[in-house]
Image: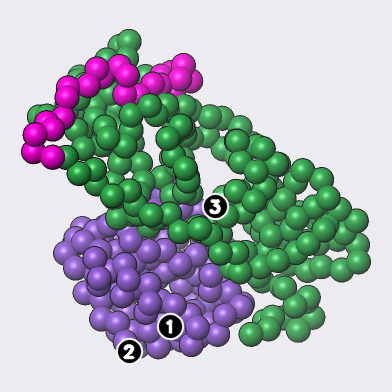
Amino acid sequence: MPYPEELVRPMRLELTSAGVKELKTAAEVDTFMAEKTGTAVLIVNSVCGCAAGGARPGIKLALQSIKPTRVATVFAGQDTEAVAKVRSYMSDIPPSSPSIAVFKDGELVHFVPRHMIEGRDPKTIASELVKAFEANAVAK
Amino acid sequence: MGTFHSDKSVLHGITVVVNTNGPKVYVGRCDDEDDVAVILKDADVHEDGQNGKSKAQYVERAAKFGVWKKFDHIAIPRSEVTSISRLGDVKPEPVKAPEPPKVLAAEAPKPADPKTIIALTENAQVEVRRLIAEQNKPGLGLRLGVKGGGCSGFSYKLEFDQKKEGDIVIPVTDFNVYLDRKSTIYLRGISLDFQTGLQGKGFVFNNPNATNTCGCGESFSV
């Protein structure tokens, strides 16, 4: 069951205020994924304080260093249709939220599952994301 | 960074590997732990040797992408637990994408006997036949392939498609398997199975030549 929107709104804002585009419908996800050129970062946001509480500031920090062509987010447990659509593009990876997927020219090149986020501070999450982005999406 | 909930154990909310003194190993999100039990949410369990994987191999695979949950909630008796560790601390061996084979100009690829490239188990044939029949499109076959540069550098492709120019066609009773020529290098000797079990249904590639298998692309849910 979704959380009350007023509780979730600040968590959405934390990313959208950093320039992350929010995708709320399956059609919006399809449009985002249809663009294959360049690098894309897709974040599955979550209310979970244990993991997403560190992920959001970590992502914001990382976005100061990396400049993906497109960056978007869906909210697990809230925008279920959009999240299911995102997962359909990564159907061989177990559902995980929060999580971060990095695409290069439409191909998934790096995936950060929840267990690589939880318990880590935002700085560590940011630095690992920057490293992975540069190694997988930029260098190739 | 500690737990988010002060009334829970230090591992609350953390995905952990719970090893036991028996054949089982569990991966799930720790809800709580005490002298009686370790309580996991969204957990999976693996038995040593299940699907040809040892406990260590299973954990290594889980460390890359996570696990498909089998239980919403499970309590593991403390008396069975030998260790609890963070899944995020497990360092999986990196899986390198195979280098493209170097073919000298004088060594033109020899035509392969298609039937020696791949095999489909009876279960896989039944499932493929069923899925093709469902789509009711003449000429539809099973396309298998590999793609490089995926999340682990190398993953399998499986889809239903029509024959394309240059494809190698492998007839399997009443349907065809299509392979693009580049993929045959990596698929030679492989067998495709369809498994149904406690971990769910899916196509599984068995590659006798692989020294490492990765979570991504090994099994496709249907």
Q: Nearer the viewer, residue B55 or A101?
A: B55
**Above or below for A133 versus B113:** below
Amino acid type, residue under disc 1 in the picture: Ser
Mark 2 = which residue?
Answer: A64
Chain B on-screen colour: green
Mark 3: few, some, or many residues within 10 Å (few <14, many ≥20)? some
B101 falls in the magenta region:
no
> In the picture provided, is A33 more to the left or to the right than B219?
left
The percent position of residue B132, horizontal first and vertical second, equals: 32, 23
Amino acid type, residue under disc 2 in the picture: Gln
**Residue at image location 56% in from the left, 30% down from the top:** B196
> In the picture provided, is B58 more to the left or to the right than A43?
right
Do callouts 1 and 2 mark residues in contact (Cβ within 8 Å)?
A: no
Mark 1 = which residue?
Answer: A127
Mark 2: few, some, or many residues within 10 Å (few <14, many ≥20)? few
Chain A on-screen colour: purple
The percent position of residue B69, horizontal first and vertical second, equals: 61, 51
Instruction: Say if residue B11 shows up in the picture.
Output: yes
> In the picture provided, is B70 more to the left or to the right than A4?
right
**Residue at image location 75% in from the left, 78% down from the top:** B10
At numbered mark 2, what does the secondary structure look like: helix, strand or loop? loop
